[in-house]
Amino acid sequence: MEGLLWIAVLALAIALAAALFVMRRRADELDRLMQLAAAASPPTADPQAAPPPGAAAPESKPVPFGAAGELLPVGVLHVGADHRITAANPRAQVLLGAAGRSVAGRSVMEAFLDARIEAAFDGVPVGGSLTAEHRAATGETRGLLVRAHRLAPDELVVVLEDVTELRRLQQIRTEFIDNLAHELRTPLSTVTLLAETLAREAELADVPHKMRDRIARIEEETGHLAQMVNEMLDLARIEGGSVLHLDDDIDLGRLAAASAERLRVFAERNHVILAVDVEPGMPTVRGDEDRLGQVVVNLVHNAVKFSPDGGEVRVAARRTPGGDAVAVSVTDHGIGIRKADQPRIFERFYKVDRARLRGGGTGLGLAIARHVVEGHGGRIAVESEEGRGATFTFTIPTHA
């Protein structure tokens, strides 16, 4: 039974990793395109003014980096002063529902029919970038990935990619993982119940010590399988576009303390001291309380696993120096994280040396934490020195 469950979970992990690899490749290609656009010179034509009433719209000019724009599989726009589109390649016109017609001279609002896109472009600083999604109603509803880079105060390069099919495949993947997780949970629950029953009966009967150890091992491994199934389901839903409910006013200090308290018994069982230090009177943050609590639990759980007997794990919540965010940190004094591992520590399925880890792990907890924190507009980072512990810190903007 356990072998079949592991095979099913491994197959699921491979399918998930393959889909995410394709997504990353597409994102890397778009990033390179944005760099080319940023390095190019702007068009020499000046079609910023809207055409007079009754006049034909001007022809779309080549995109700023030359004739190659005509062949690109993604849409490219050049936006000038007054939110006017000064150039567009043919693919951009198709994606915006203007095939055969020019969008040059139109405003961003006229092209996208969405005031939120225009407002988002306004918020991009010089040298900065923006990534957003837009649902374009062009006969059939398209999902567009919009990437904008501001070259100058009145100059913006926008890249458009049709992600309709990608989002459909992500939905299929999420539904597949959801269904598989539900199918796996039933036998896992049965095995867990049987193992717990065996453990209780072994305590009352004259069962050899070796047999009791084996029953305990079944309980432990079944718990790891259940954790993996739940975390894979969580990650698939988050990466598949599951919406975070950012409508709770949260006292992040109180939440951090309550989440840490949930793991106090786990820490005591592993002979680790759990301490909580919360600054009083902190401002609230707007977010999803359950998900942020999950982040704290994941970080504390990892810290305990990596701590030696008698070690301390400290959970702290503080207002950032500028007062515009609240920071929660989890510090341990365990084995630390090697410099080579730190850039990859938040990747899916990435795990440090198993031989030095107390208990098992799925390699998904930190990936989930990163997605949740970034979904709240925050950041998560790690500071560590091998052999001297680690500190994980995430910040969430305060609710104005």
Image (cartoon, grey):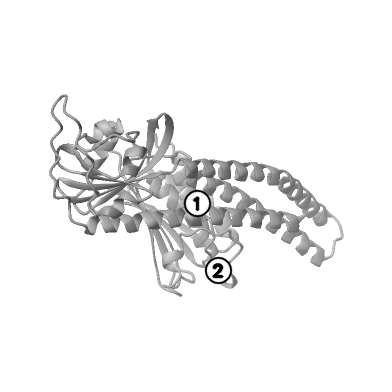
Residue visible at 69% across and 47% down in the picture: 184
Q: Secondary structure at mark 1?
A: helix
Q: As drawn, is 260 to the left or to the right of 265?
A: left
Q: As drawn, is 212 to the left or to the right of 53?
A: right
Residue visible at 60% across and 59% down in the picture: 269
| Residue that carries the numbered disc 1 in the rendered image | 297
Q: Nearer the viewer, residue 68 or 369?
A: 68
In this orientation, does residue 226 appear?
Answer: yes
Q: CA distance from mark 1 to mark 2?
A: 20 Å
Locate residue 135, reporting x and y percent. 39, 35
Residue visible at 77% across and 52% down in the picture: 195
Locate residue 152, reporting x and y percent. 16, 50
Q: Secondary structure at mark 2?
A: loop
The N terminus - image quarter: bottom right
Q: Nearer the viewer, residue 225 or 17?
A: 17
Residue 289 in which image quadrant: top left
Given the image, on which type of amino acid does mark 2 rest? Asp
10 Å crowding of disc 2: few (<14), some (14-19), many (20+): some
Observer-side mark, 1 or 2, equals: 1
| Residue that carries the numbered disc 2 in the rendered image | 309
Q: As drawn, is 52 to the left or to the right of 109?
A: left
Locate residue 231, reporting x and y percent. 57, 50
- Marked residue nearer the N-terminal end (1 or 2): 1
The image shows residue 215, relative to residue 178, as above or below, that is: below
The image shows residue 194, relative to residue 307, as above or below, that is: above
